[in-house]
Image: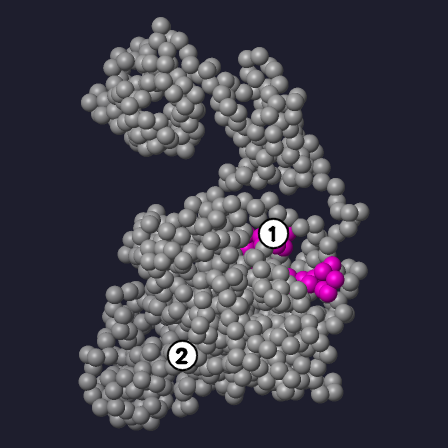
Amino acid sequence: MFCLGLGAQDFQDIGFEANGAESAHQSPTEPYEAPLTIDTSFEEAAEKNEIAYRSFSGLEDVENGYYLIGSVFSNPDPLKKTLKKLRRKGFENAGYIHNENNGLNYVYLEYFPFGLEAIDAYRSQLDGRYNNDMWILEIENSMAIGGNDMAVDEMEGPAHNMAPAVENSDEGGKEELPVAHPPLSENTGKSKLVERADAYFDKMWYAEAAQLYEQALSKGDKHFTKENVQKAADAYYFNTDMENAYKWYNVLYENYGKAMSADNLFKYSHSLKGTGKYARSKRLMRLYNRKVKEETDAATAVSDARQDTEAALDNILDLSQNIEIKNLGINTEYSDFSPMFLDSTQVVFASAKDSSFLTTRRYKWNNQPYLDLYVAQFNKESQDLRNTVKLSKEINTKYHEASVTFSPDNKTMYFTRNNYGKKLKRDSKGVNHLKIYKSTKEGDKWSEAVEVSFNSDNYSTGHPALSPDGKKLFFVSDMPGSLGETDLFVVDVLEDGSFSEPRNLGKEINTEHREMFPFFDGSKLYFSSDGHIGLGGLDVYESVYDEKDGFQEIKNLGKPVNSNKDDFSYIVDNENEYGFFASNREGGKGDDDIYSFKRLSLEETPVNQNAIAGVVTELVTGEFMPQTLVQLLDENGIKLKEVVTEDDGSFVFEDLESSTKYTLKIGKDKFVEHEMPVATVDNERVEIDIAMKRLEEMIALEDGIKKIKTEMIHFGFDKYDIRPEASKELDKLVSVMKEYPGMVIKIESHTDSRGSKAYNEYLSDKRAKSTRDYIISQGIAPERIESAIGYGESKLLNECDGSEACSEAEHLLNRRSEFIIVKM
């Protein structure tokens, strides 16, 4: 997905602002096209394209790769002004290579690690920015070596014309390609590898950038900086690789924790959801909410929905539609998305499918071919698309086209395209934005597309969606007045074909993050967002529209439409019976796939036999326990369902996922809370018997001393912090103390005899006091804990004092915490 980490949303965010916390380039530009071939070598491609080149090897201090050479000098004096002139024209990576063998200096406009990138840049004249002669210098050493960089400001001398021929050369004529010295770079604090990764990142070539950052970070502490880790995480996030994004955001969190920016916390939380870690994601969203308040100094910056994150997420997880979804046969290994009804038998969609021969122009955000619009036949019975052809050569260009909508009579079309005339147009910052274009049907052909009036060279518009009557056009933009990264807007389509001023749909719909892919059926607005509470990535939402009161409270569509990945471009037929959406969820064929869906009748609904059932009884008496609360938790500890046992102590959870791990949590007053792992078996009813212990049964008399008996309280090696498994046992102790409000205890912690006596006493005392602090944190008054003392190895329960060999089990007997009851 493309753009801001949304899988194949080739078009989802191209040109829209990306609010990366500390990235050097904040908005997705349209990177120049870079055709790649599957098998063609650089030499073959250069010869086919009649491009002059030479190759050299065995050159010290020169990085392997391909350099676009603009001019050659024997005199070093003109270099400074020549490079300054190039950089004023936007060639920020320009530099020079010195050849000690012949004394010549080769000025390059751009460097490329891959030959086919260099060839494509040559053919496009660097996106039309350079009209003079060029040729390609290939450096092919046995290994890449970074050079000693020289800053431009260190050079002196007059300006010089750009030309491929050597001027003032002692040899006369044209130099046929030199041996070289290190290329120029103004950034001497970073390795060549990181500089190249940064260059890719700034151009939003996130697939390549992620790989290079990964290589750099694997080379040791020198590269292990906050900036590199953050950019690695962002590159994976923007390319929708949530597993790797989580890996590096987690490194950031472990090192910086609460000091992370709100933006990074938000992306970290989304990467957690994207990998199914919902419980931790909820905790991170709480931290994010606090951070937003701190950074904005305004409580209004966090919506009411955000403050109710946990409850809302629980409801979404419990929500499921009675529909059947199908991955379509037209999907490819690339991005396929943004379906739209042309009529009852045809659907138009966007695809990056490779339909060319040998070479394919690729978009560097995710290294996929550029998008075109296609039309396919829709078979309602099979819910599939087939017989795909390109929509129209008048509409598709060599850049991106996607996200189409049609007027009610199918004679007018609006779609999204790069800001493109004879060449790509950019704003003052070099950003190529998206624009909405309009085309009308004249006979069987679509007319040449024209821009709509509310476009701009300084911001993006895209994802158009007409209302059923054709009188309103919804769209996405980051124009001034937006509440977040991208917002939903609407204009009125007037009778003469002109438009009203754009209106923001407001904070009921738009958040501080991304809203996109609107679809309006006349009564409901459907759209995708990563700013509202969801399952991860983009989720699909609906909002009922009222003529008087506007858009009502939004609702997440739940599973199976939504997943923990990106789900978007949802459309539905007039009867709300079937439709399509796109997703980059696991199990698909490519980057983004299009799915069809249909609502199932009661007769069509498959019978789900997956269930967990059981009976709850008392441990000692064996009596049934009615009115006992039983909760079903997922693997992340999130509550999915809860029931109360019947008179015979029985309970059942039905309609569960097959072959899935769950946890049962059982609780009742005066009983010890119990947890039990359980897993469903495909189309079977799993039976569980649960025996509950009374709280009073945790009180035991040992050698005339009353104690609260718990399972072993385990600590990490040489640690004294309370681990999650230890907290569960201590929670049981807390329940006993709450059941007996007059109870006072003292805590004793003991070690085995291994290690020094002094250290064992120190460590056990730390553990005793950590245990005391945890109990107090759970609501027990401090005065109810008389003391918390560590005794080290001074009170062994056996003869394992170091004088004789003992087994691990015998040592374990001495490592214990005891909770002695002083007063009931």
Which image quadrant is residue 743 in?
top left
| Image location of residue 659, percent across then percent down | 63, 38
Q: Is residue 682 left or right of residue 149?
A: right
Query: Badge 1, how many Cα within 10 Å: few under 14, some, many 20+?
Result: many
Q: Is residue 623 left or right of residue 384?
A: left
Looking at the rendered structure, the kind of residue marked 2 is Gly
- Above or below: residue 517 compared with residue 269: below
Q: Is residue 34 visible?
A: no
Q: Is residue 327 left or right of residue 747?
A: right
User: What residue appears at the point 66 percent right and 64 percent down from the top-left corner?
Assistant: 523
On-image quarter of the N terminus: bottom right
| Image location of residue 653, percent across then percent down | 64, 34
Give the magenta-colored segment's residue range. 556-584
Tell me whether circle 1 and circle 2 mark residues in contact (CB < 8 Å): no
Spatial CA span between label 1 and label 2 = 40 Å
- Above or below: residue 218 compared with residue 574: above
Which image quadrant is residue 398 in?
bottom right
User: What residue appears at the point 30 percent right and 75 percent down from the top-left corner?
Assistant: 183
Q: Is residue 18 visible?
A: yes
Q: Which residue is mark 1?
A: 558
Q: Which residue is mark 2?
A: 430
Q: Is residue 580 magenta?
A: yes
Q: Which element is circle 2 on?
A: loop
Q: Is residue 329 left or right of residue 796?
A: right
